[in-house]
Amino acid sequence: MSQDIIADALNMIKNSQKKGNEIVKINKISNLLIEILKIMKQEKAIKKYKIDVKEKSITLSIGDLSECKAIKPRFSCDKNQIEKYRRRYLPARNLGTLIISTNKGLVTHIEAQNENIGGCLIAYFY
């Protein structure tokens, strides 16, 4: 049984998408996972999600998504290294999103570059 809720959830989403399912039910939740799903919804990678507090689960609908993975080990990067990691994990210049944990919360790599802040790499999707 894995202890990484983020990696498990993103793998479930990716596997369901490859299988052709549009609806995914994730049985473990965390505040970090909810923040990641908010960013994915803003970027239209998922259409909607619903949190069930009683069952401690999330049901979501997959949108425009090809790949999503957690980054392990979680590299820390300063504002000058974001471009290096963007080239490493994302397939093209204007395609995909890196999620970075900063002192201002979770942000995309574009927001981090605009605000000139670094942080810790959490996940990516495109």
Image: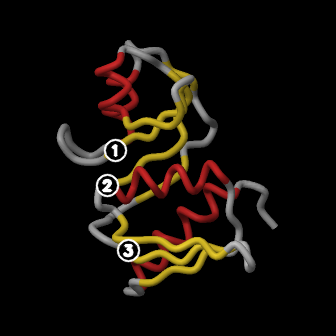
Between the C-alphas of marks 3 and 1, the distance is 16 Å
The residue drawn where x is 56% and y is 29% is 120
Instruction: Report the front residue among 106 and 122.
Output: 106
Instruction: Report the front residue among 18 and 10.
Output: 10
Between the C-alphas of marks 2 and 1, the distance is 6 Å
Q: Secondary structure at mark 3?
A: strand
Residue 53 placement, left or right of 35: right
Crowdedness near tag 3: few (<14), some (14–19) or many (≥20) residues, C-alpha within 10 Å: many
Label 3 amino acid? Ile
Label 1 amino acid? Thr
Label 2 amino acid? Tyr
| Residue that label 2 marks | 126
Residue 3 lies, in percent from the top left, at 78, 56
Question: Which image quarter is the N terminus in?
Answer: bottom right
The residue drawn where x is 71% and y is 68% is 28
Decide which of tag 2 and tag 1 comes sooner along the chain.
1
Residue 55 sits above or below residue 105 on the image = below
The disc at residue 97 is 1
The residue drawn where x is 34% and y is 70% is 47
Q: Are marks 2 and 1 in contact (CB under 8 Å)?
A: yes
Residue 109 placement, left or right of 91: right
Residue 71 lies, in percent from the top left, at 54, 43
| Residue that label 3 marks | 62
